[in-house]
Image: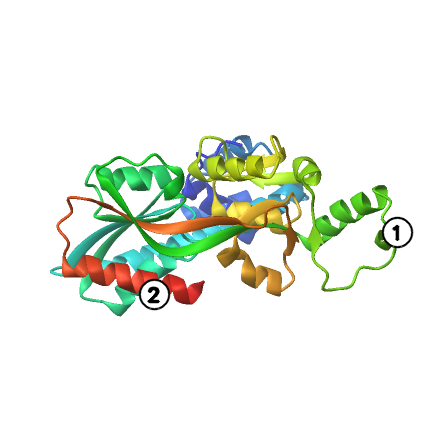
Amino acid sequence: MDTRISIYKLEVLCEVISNGSVTRAASRLGVAQPVVSAHLRSLESRLGVRIVQRDGRGIVLTPAGEIVYRWATEVVNDTRHLGTLLEALTRDGAEALSVTTGINGASNGIAHAVVRFQLQHPGTRIDLRVLPTDQAVAAVLKRESDLAVVSYASALELDAALELTPLATDELVLVASPDLAAATLAPESRANGDPAATRPRPRRRQLSVSSKQLAEIPFVCTPGGTVRRAAIDRAMLERGVKARHLVMEVRSETAFHAAVRDGIGFALLSRRTTIEMVSRGQLTEVAMPGGPVSIGIHLVSRRDLVPLPLHRLFREAVQAELETGG
């Protein structure tokens, strides 16, 4: 899967599906029909799946396309919402603060905490950027950002010029769609000769996996080379798992969560992210050896940063928001 996908391609897909045809979508977008078709072909090529197919004179989604369309809709809507928020932040004469967050910040509450701070302090103008964790930290080192609020910073080899301030704690829990969890784990119990597995499970009984099962169940994860992936791989080694059965690697948090909810595989996700989905029955939490993986949320700054009252106010407000949200 090639993740170098422009948001405009996703907007094109959304227009095609909402209008039911390439021709009408092209008219709405103000471009020629071949341009729309080219964007669809490019999107399918980058994702490696067929997204749409002909149905009479119209266009319909394939099964893979249903997943992609749901993700595209969320990304397009979130991007438009982000634009609205950022426009609200650009007030002339406001006290300025440059902040970066990690790409997983939207899912574990970090980005929300930063936006909440600006809403509570309208006299402040925040330049907010979302980058991979290592790049977010590097932006602070290069003085491109005043501060960074990220997870997994403790997994990095930090430059001596940087300082970490703990803000909150989180943990990664093993989750899957209820159907996948039941179909994957119940047969394992029967294969091991567990007579209780032949009886109906109590509705609230939590499923669990062994280290052997952790190595065999299908996994959705971030790509190799990412800070999050390195932290998860290390946690798996600590639990006796040298290699996992990876069925999908994806950077986008939205696509990541959609893949897990739709039953593509198990995943280690932030408890802050999953607590509501588990309570609604969209995901099932599965106990694993060693328990959840503890991670921290940190504020990253340069040691030579001259502290301003705004910096302290920001740290305290974001920390309070994260603790409330946790």
Give the residue pinned by disc 1. Answer: 195
- For the point 60% across and 30% down, the residue is 242
Left or right: 115, with 45 as reference point? left
Left or right: 158, with 204 as reference point? left
Q: Residues within 10 Å of mark 1 (few under 14, many from 20)?
A: few
252 or 107, which is in the foreground?
107
Left or right: 106, with 309 as reference point? right
Identified by mark 1, the residue type is: Pro
308 to 102, vertically: above or below: below
- For the point 37% across and 37% down, the residue is 156
Give the residue pinned by disc 2. Answer: 320
170 or 9, which is in the foreground?
170
Give whichever of discs 1 and 2 has the lower sequence position.
1
Where does residue 37 sit, x and y in percent of width and height?
Answer: 51, 36
Left or right: 265, with 92 as reference point? right
- For the point 38% across and 61% down, the residue is 322
134 to 298, vertically: above or below: above
Identified by mark 2, the residue type is: Ala
Of the residues tagged 1 and 2, which is closer to the observer? 1
Where does residue 260 sit, x and y in percent of width and height?
Answer: 61, 48
- For the point 37% across and 60% down, the residue is 112
Where does residue 224 sit, x and y in percent of width and height?
Answer: 49, 31
66 or 313, which is in the foreground?
313
Where does residue 207 sit, x and y in percent of width and height?
Answer: 71, 53
Is residue 69 in sight in this rendering?
Answer: no
Q: Quarter holding the C terminus?
A: bottom left
Kindly state the secondary structure of the residue where label 2 is placed: helix
Q: Quarter holding the N terminus?
A: top right
User: Residue furthest toward the bottom?
Assistant: 120
CA distance separating discs 1 and 2: 49 Å
In the drawing, what numbered circle is on residue 318? none
Query: Number of labelled discs?
Result: 2
